[in-house]
Amino acid sequence: MTKKLKQFLPIIILIGIVFAIYAFNLNNRLFWDDDDWIINNNSVHNISWDNIKFWFSENVLAGVGLKSNYYRPMLFFTFAVNYAISGIKPWSWHLLSNFLHIANGLMIFYLFSRFGAGRVAAFLTALVFLVHPIATEAVTYISGRGDPLYVFFGLAALLAFIKSQSPGSGALAYRLTSYLALVLALLSREVAIIFPLLLIVAYIAFISKDRFWMSLKKGFVKSLPYLAIVVAYGVLRLTVLNFDNTLNFYGTQNIYSENLHVRLLTFMHVLADYVRLLVWPTGLHMERSMTVHTSLFQWPVWPVFLILLGLIGWLIFLYRKGKNTDFKVWFFGVAWFFIALAPVSGITPINAILYEHWLYLPLIGPWFIAAFYLVRLLNFLKLRNKTFLLIPCLLLLVAYLSFFAYQSIRRNILWGKPVEFFEDILKYEPNSARVNNNLGNLYFNQGDIEKAETSYRKTIAAGDIFAQPHYNIGSILQSRGDVEGAIEEFERAIAVDPNFTYSYQNIAVLYVKKGNLVKAVEYLEQLKKLLPQYSRVYYNLALLYVARGDSKSALDNLSKGLTFANADPEAKTLIERLLSELTKK
């Protein structure tokens, strides 16, 4: 019993601590991107064969008639499971995300305790991973579940690969399990493409007994099946699954998106911020702005560059001195961090320059190094009977990790208060158009129309490059009965972004009120081109054509709309009812 307790006690402690921290998010409502990804997205409201096909063939926003670069069918499967369990009531959503986070921490503990670190260092690494407050952006934010989900499958693939390297009859089964887990990781979040490189790093650090270059060669050979899977996935994402310019999130050219050296120089500054967040995670918030750097000699680009050169020199020194254990620890930690961060480094232009949740997987690397040497220090003090130093070190460690846990609890509580959450971001980023717009939406939903309009106009003042605030102001004017003002704002939204679909429907409604069915049809026909698989557009067009006495056009739209209606049962019922009425005539 004592042996079993000793074996399972670290696991019990890890689970208990995480449950205590993340119990604070169980009642947090879904909001922000959850509106488009879940609440308004009919494709995740039931698990059907049609929806499964939809997840695997469309981008994540296709269900609300929009385009995006994201393709995450496995993530959407988990959304559909949660919706089937509790609708949009939040408890099941957060339970699943919390479970994934705990499972990831336990796999980290297992990985490091079995291979090369010792149970204490493994426990500390897993503990920091689980309690670090930057994880809340990936775990508590439901639309951010792609991070814990792909890490779950990625770590499972890595552990299955390591198991497959042991002799025995189960090697083939472990390899096949590893391949399947990688596929599921890729279908959960695109950044799982880095898995083959992480596998090579883990092979060199934990499995191979050969010298570095021979280990690298053997690790590369063993990674080839995984590379083949990643290449096949990449080809699909660049061809049949290339929804909205997969390799560049920027619709218009700018100095950052068009110049690789600018992105890499800017990443030096990002690294400085990331290191600060890893060590002292205060001032946490989303939607961070970042200075774009064009020269190596700007602050803090050049100091970070020199530190990176020093880090490379340190690794070379450890390797040449034959310090095998130290080299493997440093090699694993450094390589894991930079490989896991590579997809969001700016090498490929993506939707932002810095996000806290992008550290979810990378943080394992540097904290593994810290845990390893912290345990070495504590063991040294213990062996030398330096209790007067050992106890303060342990107390400082407990205080430091308690600070992490406290920050995580604060973040979990704040995530449950959307208005305060956005207001907190605006303390750091007052000119964030997206945050001002989202805050305006919350004010609007609360009935505080004046505050909502103020936030929308702040969004426009920050840079008139988003259609949403014009649409939202148009909706306010529409509710006040100002038809002409509303139409003007909706048209401005379309001028800013012709692919912003929401305005077309509202303009059509307003022209119907004015009795101008020709203009209403004109806008809905444009909307049909933008949303060719959205059944409700066909139904609304059919209603207008019926009102104009054009039964043929109405029937054509209803027949076409019916072919896309399986994903929206309510629209299917409406279309079938109107078809029946028209055909009887």
Image (cartoon, rainbow, N blue to C red):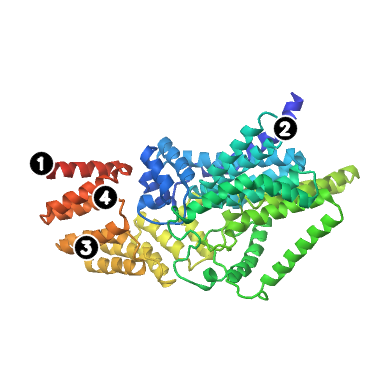
- In the displayed structure image, the side of residue 548 where residue 131 appears, left or right: right
Between label 2 and label 3, give the one nearer the viewer.
2
Residue 564 in the image, given as x and y percentages of width and height: 29, 46
Q: In the displayed image of the protein, which residue is found farthest to the top?
A: 1
Decide: marks 4, 1 in contact (CB < 8 A)?
no
Amino acid type of disc 4? Arg
Q: Considering only order in the chain, which callout, 3 or 4, is on the residue closer to the N terminus? A: 3
Dot placed on the residue nearer the N-terminal end, 3 or 1: 3
Specify the amino acid type for callout 1: Lys
Q: Nearer the viewer, residue 202 or 233?
A: 233
Q: Amino acid at mark 3?
A: Glu
Which amino acid does the dot numbered 2 rest on?
Pro
Position of 136 with respect to 169 (left or right) is left
Residue drawn at the location 48% of the way across and 45% of the way down: 75
To which residue does mark 4 refer? 536
How far separated are the C-alphas under marks 2 and 1? 72 Å
Asked which quadrant contains residue 22, the reply is: top right
Mark 2 touches mark 3? (CB < 8 Å): no
Name the residue tied to disc 1: 584
Ranked by sequence position, the earlier of labels 4 and 1 is 4
Residue 522, numbered circle: 3
SS category of the residue bearing label 2: loop
